Structures are given as structure tokens and as C-alpha cells.
């Protein structure tokens, strides 16, 4: 099957009842890969929903008033129970602006969820007992409210892993395109 036929077939599948693909920007979907615009719209909606979930899930765990980034930083610091450097946190979370992570760490420190230390000349951040307890409670709430619901829709682990792999691969393409765009 020729590439044009496959594209037409996929576009036809997305156009239920004569309605075009579900996108946020039709002018972008008019290009060579309309399905990418569908993925982008899905990422937009999923990203905002994920941020709402993190904030409300952490509030339900007893720690209100954290931003999505602060929740991510807390969970990353708690990961494997080892202290992290700011550079490590930025790298793992894909954040270029270190000041965003620095501000998040300061807020988490103020709340008693993390504590700063040093490893040589580098600042490190470790989770406190209060922070670990908040992460554990968040985990319990996540299992009860989110994981249970997602399992009911039939998403199996292999399928979820494939989606995650695709998203990580796409992130590399978006990063490369961003670097190229910055050089124009």
C-alpha cells in the first residue's frame, strides 16, 4: 500500500461522520501528517488534565497549594530515596530553566517536604520524612482513583508501555525541531 493510500485511510478513520480529525489547529493539520496534530491536541488535553490531577491528588494527600512542577520535583526527589542535584532534576524532568526547579525546591523546603544538602560543590535535595509520607499517601490515592479507573477501560501494561515509548521518542523529535528552530 502506498504511503498516500495509508495516509488517506488513517485520515478517513479519523473523520467519523464527515468530521475532520480532532485537532486544536486545523491549519497545522492541513500539512503532510494530520495525525501528528491529533497527537498534539491529545497531549494538550492530557497535559492539562495531568497537571490538575497532580495538584488535586497532592492536596488530597494533605499537601495543598503546590504547583504541578512542585509535585513533579517532590516525586523526583523521592525517587529511589537518594538525594538529587538540581542538574539531575532538570535533566530527568527535561527542564532547561534551572531557576524554575530552584524555586520549586525552595517552596518544598519551606513546606518541610525536602531538605537541601551538599555533595562537593553541588547543592543536593533529599526528601524528608514528611515528604516521603506525602508521596506515599499520594500513591494510595492514585491507586484508588486513577489506576483502578484506567484498568477498567482495558488499557493493558504492554499497551501503556508502547504509548510511553512513543511519547518519549516524539519528545526527542520535538527537542531536535526546537534546536533547529532556534538556529533559524
Image: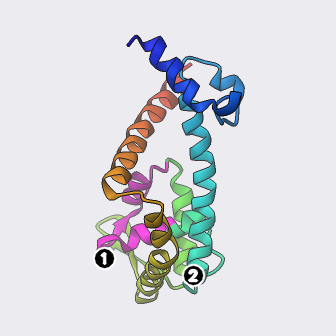
For label 1, the crowd category at 10 Å Cα-Cα, with few meaning under 14, some 14 to 19 and many 20 or more, is few
Does dot 1 land on a helix, a strand or a loop? helix
Q: 134 or 103: nearer the eye?
A: 134
Q: How far across and down, in percent of the image, does residue 19 sit?
A: 70, 30
Q: 126 or 154: nearer the eye?
A: 154
Mark 2 or mark 1, which is nearer to you? 1
Does dot 2 land on a helix, a strand or a loop? helix
Image: 50 above or below 168? below
The prevailing secondary structure element of the residues shown in magenta is helix
For label 2, the crowd category at 10 Å Cα-Cα, with few meaning under 14, some 14 to 19 and many 20 or more, is few
Instruction: Name the image quarter holding residue 57.
Output: bottom right
Image quarter of the N terminus = top left
Give left or right: position of 104 versus 132.
right
Point out which mark residue 81 bears: 1
Magenta residues span 72-95
| Alpha carbon separation for disc pair 2 and 1 | 20 Å
- Residue marked by disc 2: 110
Give yes or no for residue 93 being in the magenta stretch. yes
**Residue at position x 54%, y 84% from top?**
61
Give yes or no for residue 153 being in the magenta stretch. no
Amino acid at each position: 500500500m502506498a504511503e498516500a493510500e495509508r495516509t488517506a485511510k488513517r485520515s478517513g478513520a479519523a473523520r467519523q461522520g464527515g468530521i475532520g480529525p480532532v485537532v486544536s489547529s486545523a491549519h497545522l493539520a492541513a500539512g503532510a501528517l494530520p495525525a501528528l496534530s491529533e497527537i498534539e491536541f491529545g497531549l494538550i488535553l492530557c497535559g492539562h488534565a495531568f497537571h490538575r490531577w497532580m495538584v488535586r491528588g497532592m492536596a488530597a494527600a494533605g499537601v495543598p497549594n503546590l504547583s504541578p512542577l512542585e509535585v513533579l520535583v517532590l516525586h523526583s526527589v523521592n525517587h529511589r530515596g537518594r538525594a538529587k542535584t538540581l542538574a539531575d532534576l532538570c535533566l530527568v524532568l527535561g527542564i532547561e530553566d534551572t531557576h524554575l526547579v530552584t524555586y520549586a525546591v525552595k517552596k518544598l523546603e519551606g513546606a518541610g517536604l525536602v531538605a537541601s544538602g551538599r555533595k562537593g560543590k553541588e547543592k543536593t535535595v533529599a526528601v524528608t520524612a514528611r515528604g516521603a509520607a506525602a508521596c506515599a499517601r499520594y500513591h494510595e490515592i492514585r491507586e484508588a482513583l486513577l489506576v483502578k479507573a484506567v484498568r477498567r477501560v482495558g488499557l493493558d501494561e504492554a499497551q501503556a508501555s508502547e504509548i510511553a515509548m512513543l511519547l518519549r521518542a516524539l519528545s526527542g523529535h520535538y527537542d531536535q525541531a526546537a534546536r533547529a528552530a532556534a538556529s533559524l
